[in-house]
Image: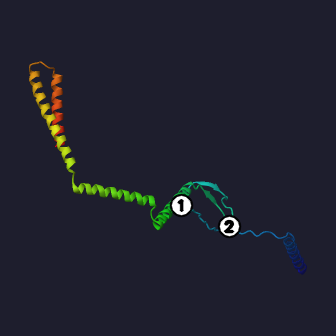
Amino acid sequence: MKRNAVIAGGVVILVASIALAYWLLRGPRPLVYSGTVETREIEVGSKVGGRVTDVAVEEGQMVKASTMLVRFEADELKAQLAQSRASADQAEADLAKMEHGNRPEEIAQAEATARAQQAAYEAAKSGPRTQELAQAQADYDAAQADAINAEATFKRMAMLVRGETISRQQYDDALAKRDAMAQKSESAR
């Protein structure tokens, strides 16, 4: 039995030696483990909105800081920039005008306007001249005479139209002339 134990021990050593040799000779193998890998998601945004004209990177591509990702259409921003520059130029022109004063032509025009206004004020303050009053009285007297004449003509035409001596049109014309002369006389008064 001793002999059987020695043979069994030899067989065990032989199998262990073969397994060890096989494991050492097959070379390095990658280690495979199971598990869960968690990643960080980063959302990228823009302070300015608009239509995207060019995308410079692909999804999942590695990028470094200050790498251009997308290009936007900038027409609206260019218009705002032009408007801001124009406002700045206008403000500079206003400042220069305030610092240097008005041009001599503008000063002369303002003085001429002031003189004309002063003359109109003086004329209104002193009232109409005697010649102007006399002319207005003459215009009124003439208008009054025309109105009286038109009234007399109308009365004659009224009698003649009743007797059917004149046409209704002539009567209507006399009536219209009477009313017009009365209005002219009132306006001249």
From where the camera sits, is residue 187 visible?
no
User: Which marked residue is nearer to the observer: mark 2 or mark 1?
Assistant: 1
Residue at point 45%, 61% (across, down): 104
- Depth check: 67 or 33 in front? 67
Q: Locate residue 103 relative to residue 189 in the image: left or right.
A: right
Q: Which residue is mark 2?
A: 64
- The residues bearing labels 2 and 1 have C-alpha atoms spaced at a distance of 35 Å
Residue tagged by mark 1?
85
User: Label 1 amino acid?
Assistant: Arg
Element type at mark 1: helix
**Residue 67 visible at all:** yes
Q: Nearer the viewer, residue 168 or 151?
A: 151
Residue 117 in the figure: left or right of residue 100:
left
If you read the primary sequence from the N terminus, does the residue marked by circle 2 or circle 1 appear first?
A: 2
Residue at 48% across / 66% down in the picture?
A: 100
Quick check: marks 2 and 1 in contact, CB under 8 Å? no
Query: Seen in the image, is 114 located left or right of residue 164?
Result: right
Instruction: Tell me what residue is drawn at x 42 percent, y 60 percent.
Output: 107
The three-letter code of the residue at mark 2 reads Lys
Furthest residue to the front? 131
Where is the C terminus found, in terms of image quarters? top left
The figure's colour scheme reads rainbow
Query: Horizontal and vertical percent for residue 86?
Result: 52, 59
In the figure, is residue 107 to the left or right of 120? right
User: Label 2 neighbourhood size at 10 Å, few (<14), some (14-19), many (20+)?
Assistant: few
